[in-house]
Every structure is written in structure tokens, then in C-alpha cells.
Image (cartoon, coloured by chain):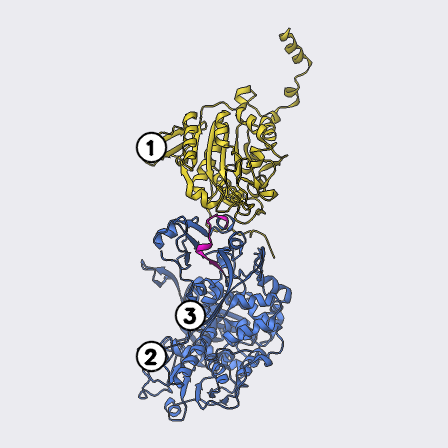
Chain colours: A yellow, B blue
Amino acid sequence: MTYHRPEFRHPDLPTNDLGYTKKQYEGAISTLCAGCGHDSISAGIIQACFELSIEPHKVAKVSGIGCSSKTPTYFLGSSHGFNSVHGRMPSVATGANLANRELTYIGVSGDGDTASIGMGQFAHVVRRNLNMLYLVENNGCYGLTKGQDSATADVGSMGKKGTPNPFEPIDLCTLALELGATFVARSFSGDKEQLVPLIKAALSHSGFALIDVISPCVTFNNTTTSTKSYEFVREHIEATGKTDFIPVRQEITADYDPGFTQEVTLHDGSVIHLYKEDENLDVHNRLSAIQAIHERKAKGEILTGLLYLDPDCQDLHEIIGSVEKPLRDLDETALCPGNRSLEAINDSLR
Amino acid sequence: MKPTDIKNPEYFHQVVDCQYACPAHTPVPEYIRLIAQQRYTDAYMINWESNVFPGVLGRTCDRPCEPACRRGRVEAEPVAICRLKRVAADFKDDITSRLPDIPQEKNGRKVALVGAGPASLTVARDLAPLGYELEIYDEQPIAGGFMRSQIPSFRLPETVLDEEVGYILDMGLTTHLNHYVDSLKGLLDQDYDAIFVGSGAPRGRDLPDLPGRQEGDASIHIGIDWLSNVAFEHIEKIGKRVIVLGGGNTAMDCCRTARRVGGEDVKVIVRSPFESMKASAWEKEDAIHEGIPFVDNHVPLEFVVEDGKLVGMRFEKVSAVFDENGKRSLVPTGEEPVLFPCDEVLVAIGQENAFPWIEKDIGIEFDNWGMPVLNAQTFQSSCAKVFFGGDSAFGPENIITAVAHGHQAAVSIDLFCDGKQVNQRPPPGTNLLSTKMGIHEWSYDNDVTTDVRKIVPLVELTSALQNRTMEVELGFDAQAAFDEAERCLNCDVQTVFTDDKCIECDACVDICPMDCINFIENNDEPELRQSLRVKAVNASQDIYVSGNLETGRVMVKDENVCLHCGLCAERCPTAAWDMQQFFYQVTKAAPLCIK
């Protein structure tokens, strides 16, 4: 009996700008159930970070509690990480980001960790526009405690337990839009072609980026009666369009039909191309996004893809006017300027 | 692409690279697993059933399996398959009780076997359990053929050869040793139901027209004849300075033998560049280890004879030039010819077939190169009751090829004697069985070690060179054998995919350490190969394509560097992937040769 991932990798694996292969972005072998959607999302994060040539030691992974929050162990094994208290990941992420604004922050949470116990923290990290990727691995149930319905389960959806969910679901995307999120997307763990470009775009966005990823729980919520099963999601998924992420320095070579294409240049100069399925959707317009989600929902469909993006937003550091230099790099004299400075401040208030 | 037909046993057979490359298709991973379990006797019997001479081959095989080994595509070196075979032979218990029963009452059919080498002995081994009466002829006093006459005892101890040849001779064969068959017609005139010719390629090439050849004859020897004379103790020593001409394995055996029978300054001189010499890399290494220098790019010009005595050889220096078709020619460099002084010369520049004993008018057709015209599958000649195998069939090869020929010729002889069509051959024996025992538990060791190839320890050089019959290689001990066996990737444990169980969750794609698995739109093979996660550029390795899945995509797996680690099956929530052990047994005359 063994459960190890062999050391060997394909000898022809491509390398990125740093000379790394995908292997340098892997983590420990997953201990989640076989077939868990979360593992596909971890693979998507690995692929996105590899393709963006992010230096693993310049990433901090933060999470709360739950199956989803275990996953940072399974990717970016050389990055920093903090597995915090249930629903309190946003506080830890905020503190870490304030101390060192130079890292890339990847928060991984679940529907329980975000929509139930962590709802308060989620609301505030959205409105503060903390520069991070906040990825929700949304399976509509509490997998770690044997599959009870979570706050994102649809009315009438029925998992392995066999009782239809009676309560209204929380839609994290419309909620985040209401709260002023500057990057909102929804995706599906079973569609990496859509997920990986969205993760890359979210990591390049300077501000709060939410991706709500529907991630089926194979053990407790992959029944034919569940609205978060592989089968149901595949049958009812609709995309806002195909998203292409073009990093800085790379020339745009494809021809785009202007009527159905929306081009967004991010803060760092990279470009997102959205080949839209829906001509009426404007990803710069909150109302348009909320309307599109509701319209699809009314038809029993799940709208995925990039929903909203404000590339010119100000993140928390810009809003509060913090110093350019990360706080952790400031020496004692800068951090504690002494009595004379205090007196100067006090004098200014008199 | 159409879905892969995994019901065709040849598909999974090709995935077992080592077994597929072996002319006799020995089930290599199976016996390596048995070695790891210290079931040496069982490992030996798997070999014996398939290749008849495990102890001999474990020391001398040309090992076509090793360059094919998947491990060599994953890291630097393949599994030491050949030397593991020797481990099975070294550590086995008495096997006599497991040998096939030989019926007391014969089946009334009589077969003559010409030559007592590996091909004839294999035919005998396969037919004896069926009750055939077998008569074997050889000009030498002891059976074994070129395994005895040409492979020096420091590579293959006589005891090992005697034992394995003995198992067959003890099956009630009638032996006619010291008996050179000088007429095939004579045999045809007797009451044999079939005749098998396994007389080898007995004629060593010479350089008859090179100046000085006649005058120096007393000191110039044909390599294979000289080795044979040493083996049968007709020759016991050689001069101090020896030149060996040729770059094949016979040349390696000649130079190393010469070092042991009095040669002090022995050198190999070869026409071609060192890299393109025909000898196996490991045989070259062994010769170099024994302090034998190689002089390459030297073409012989003349034997220099003074006062009726050979004093040296003169060579022209050349360099290899390739034309646009990649054809090589050796072009003289224009430098002065070089003289290498010597006392004796061994000419090991190849060997060829010779059938002076086969009459031209008895219905055996020969081609323009003097080779018998044969059916490549049945080994039947143009004379229906005469079959050929080993080096006498298609020219000089090696022991394992001779064994493979022998098995097929035996099938043909059995069909022929039964009055059946020899080309209507029974299918190979195959089996495919799940190895699943639990969530993370398989009936094979699926952990992939990163250990590098173990080196076989050798006898200390000085004492090795003092004794012609002392075996140089000591073989692996039990621990080294286990470690080396663990390097095997178990390629016979197949990744079997069931389309209609798959829910396309990507778990297998995400876990696969080698990025072998893909779920993509179907296409023609060349396009499909280009569109995989890692392009499938090794055309010699198949891609495994499923039927259409729920999303309209197909599963495509590149077999090339699959580690057979089983993680795809462990991470599959619906058991759409399973690890199934595949066993492939070549068609043989006697289906069950071991007990």
C-alpha cells in the first residue's frame, strides 16, 4: 500500500520564464475524496501560477476551515501559508497584506467558510477592496461534516442525505457586486479552459477578486437531484463568453470581432479579452452583471465566466494611503518615530 | 481516431516494452515482481518456460529488452533486466519436480534436430512433453552449440550451461554427438516425420586476399574457431602481443580470452569509429575495464611477415564520412600507414552461414545470398518437412532469437505432424485481471522508487585475468536484486479505462505525475498527438483513445512515459480507471510446459 506521488515528471514538460516546470508549483498529494472538484481547482491554480511565472516564494496562501481550506496544502508547496480559524481568513489576509503588500495573496474558502460562519468577514474584505484572489470552492454542502446543506444550496436541491433544501441560497457573486467588489467571476471546477484564464486575470487584478467556483462534492452532493453535481452543472452551465488572458509584454495576435468582444486592460498592463456570448452584458457595469445573473437564474441556468471588472479601482493601500514600502521592511526608527513626532501630531490637533 | 481496441491482446502487449522487444516475449515484469518477493524459483520457471536458458541468458543475452525499457525514457538508465534474470537462476531451489512430465509412451512421431544449440534444444524442449521421439545431432562432443563453443567460461560458467542443457537432454532425447551431418538427403531418407535445422552460422569471415595472409597463416586465427578451440581445450595459450580485428561481440570475447591465455599486449583494431562498433555497449565496457585498448578508424592493409613469421599488421587510417542519405563511407585520411607489431592475430569480423551438407537437388530452395527460403512465421522451408531456426534461418543473431525461432518451429512441426495447416496458428495465451485490493491498495507494489541502476560487482581484476574459467561477474546479492527489482515500473499492470463509468471530474488528469491523460475533442491521430497536454512525439508508443464521453470529448492517454503508478485509478471516484495485470504468453507447441 502506497499513497505517494512519484518524483518523476514528463521529461518534455514546458518551462516558464523562471525556468520552472509545473512541478515547482505543486504541493503535497491531496487527501480529499477521489474525484473532488477542489483538486481540479488546485490544479488550475498551479497551472495559472506556472503560466504567469509567479515566483512561489512571493505568494501567500490563506484559508479558513473546511475541505476547501485544506487545499492550500495541495498546491504551491514552496509558498507561504496560513490556515486560520473558521471564517476568519479575511482578517489574516488583511493583516498579512498590510504588513507586506508585495506578496500575491490567494485566499481559498468554501461555501460554509464564506457564506455562513465567515459572512461578516467576507462582507468587509470585499468593501475594503483588499488586493487578493478570494476563491470560493462552492459545493453547496458541508462535506467535512458529512454533507449537510450549506447556505449556497439551491431551494429544492437534494444531496445524498435525501432531504430537499428548504432555504433560499446566498449568491456570492451578486452579494459581492452589491458590496462593491471590483472583480467578480464564476466558474466550474470541471472546466479548466475557463477557470485557468480567470484565475490568471484575478491574480493580475489589483484589488479584491472573487471567483465563485462550483466544485461538486462527489461523496455527498453529486446526486442526480443536486444542483451542484457534475451532471447538473454541465447541463445548465452558460458562460458570459470565453475569456482570454494576455500577460504584459505579449503581443495580441488573434483577430477579434468587435461587436462581441470586450477588451479590458488591467493595472499591470495585461489584457483580458472576453468573447461574449451575450451582447448585452457589459463587464464594466454592475447592474448589467447583476441583471445577467438573475435572468439566467430565472431560466434555471448557471451563468459563469467573467461577470464584472473595474480595472481602475483603488485597493486598500491606495484608499488608506499607506506607504509604498512594505511595513515589514521599515526599520524601528520609521515604525516608532519617537516622542518628537508624537508631539508634532498632538500639536497639530490642538 | 477510433477507440482503441483493448480486446486485441497485441495492444497491451506493446505497452509492456521489455516483453514486446524480447524476441521470445518473456513476461519480464512478472518475473521481476517474483524476484522482489524472493520467489526465485517461480521467477526462474516463468523464464524457463519462455526462454529455456535463464541462467545462460541472465549472463549473456543481447538484452533487446533493456533499450526498450520504459524506465530509460523516464530517467537515465533502464532496469537491469538481464542481470535480474541471473538472480532468479542463482537463487532458485531444485526445479526438477516442476519440469514437464515426459510421456513414457511416445506419440509415434520422430523428429531429427541438426545441431545441438539453443534453437534445436528449444524445439526439443517444446516437443518432448508431447511424446515426440527426438534425435539430436552435433559435431561437437558436448551439446550446447555456440553457447558452449563461442561464449567464454569467464562470462558463462560451464556448470550453468551444463545444467540448463541437461534439463532438455534428460527429457529422453537420443543424442548423436561427435556426429557431423554431411547429408540432409541422408536424413530425409530415414523415417523422420520432420527435420529441424539449427546448425547455426558456423563460418567465420576471413581476409583471404590481404597480403601476407597465406605466409602468416600459422599466427592468424578465425575468431569463432579460435574461441571454440579454447573452449574445448585444443588451444591453451597465445602470443604476448595480440591484435583482434573486428568490433562485434565476438571480438570482445576474443580479446578478453586472449588476455587470459597469455596475451599481455592485446588490442582491438576496428575499421569503424568506436561509437558505431557492433558490440554491445556493456561488452565494450567490460573489455575496456580489463585494460584492452581500442584503436578505431583503422582499415587493415597487410599482414607483415618476416622470415616466415608474423611480426605485425599495417593499417590505413580512415575517417567516417556521411553522404546526404546518411550512408557512411570510410575515407582514407591520407596519413602514412601505421604498423602495429604483434605475434598473433584473431580475425573476428563477422560470420556467415554455410550449408555444404545440404544437397542442391532435394527441394530446398536457397536465395541469392545462400540462405534457405523460409516462411518467416512458420520457419518451414520449401521442403515441407524441413524447418530451420536460429542463426541458420536468417543469419547470425543471438541466443534469445534462436530460442524464439525454436518455439515457433516446434509449433509448426507439431501442426505439420498432425496434418494441419502450419500457418493456422493457435492464439497467444493472455489474461487481464484487476489488481485492486483497497482504496490505496493494489496487488502489485505501485510505489515508484528513484533509485538509480545497481552495478553488478566484479571479481578483482588481477585474479580474473589469471583464470580463464573464473566468472568475472559476481551477480547481485539478494538486497541489490530487491533494490533493482523495485525499479521496475510494472508496465504489465495496465491502465484500463471504461468510458461509461467516467464522470469527467479531471481527478486522473490532475494527479497523473507524467501528464499522460487528456480529455479533449477527438481528431485524427497526428492532430491528436499534437494537441495533448504534453505532445505525444514518440511515434513508437501508442495513444489510448476512449469512446465518446458525456461531454462529447474523448479520453486520450499517451502510453509513452506512464509510470503505471495507479494514481489515476486511486483518484477515480467511479472506478472508470482500473489497474489490471496483463499476462501474455507466446503460442507454444506444449501449452503448459511447467508444473
Tell me how far mark 2 sits from mark 1, CA to CA. Answer: 71 Å
Q: Residues within 10 Å of mark 2 (few under 14, many from 20)?
A: some
What chain does mark 2 sit on? B
On the image, numbered disc 1 is attached to which residue? A260
Residue A265 visible somewhere in the drawing: no
On the image, numbered disc 2 is attached to which residue? B373
What chain does mark 1 sit on? A
Q: Nearer the viewer, residue A141 or B477?
A: A141
Over which residues does the magenta segment extend? B494-507
Q: Could you say where residue A225 lies in the image, as x and y percent from the top left?
A: 49, 45
* 3 vs 2, front mark: 2
Q: Nearer the viewer, residue B10 or A283?
A: A283
The image quarter in which residue B355 lies: bottom left
Q: Are marks 3 and 2 in contact (CB under 8 Å)?
A: no
Residue A277 visible somewhere in the drawing: yes
Can you tell which mark lies on residue B408? Answer: none
The C terminus of chain B, quarter of image: bottom right
To the question of a shared chain for discs 3 and 2, the answer is: yes
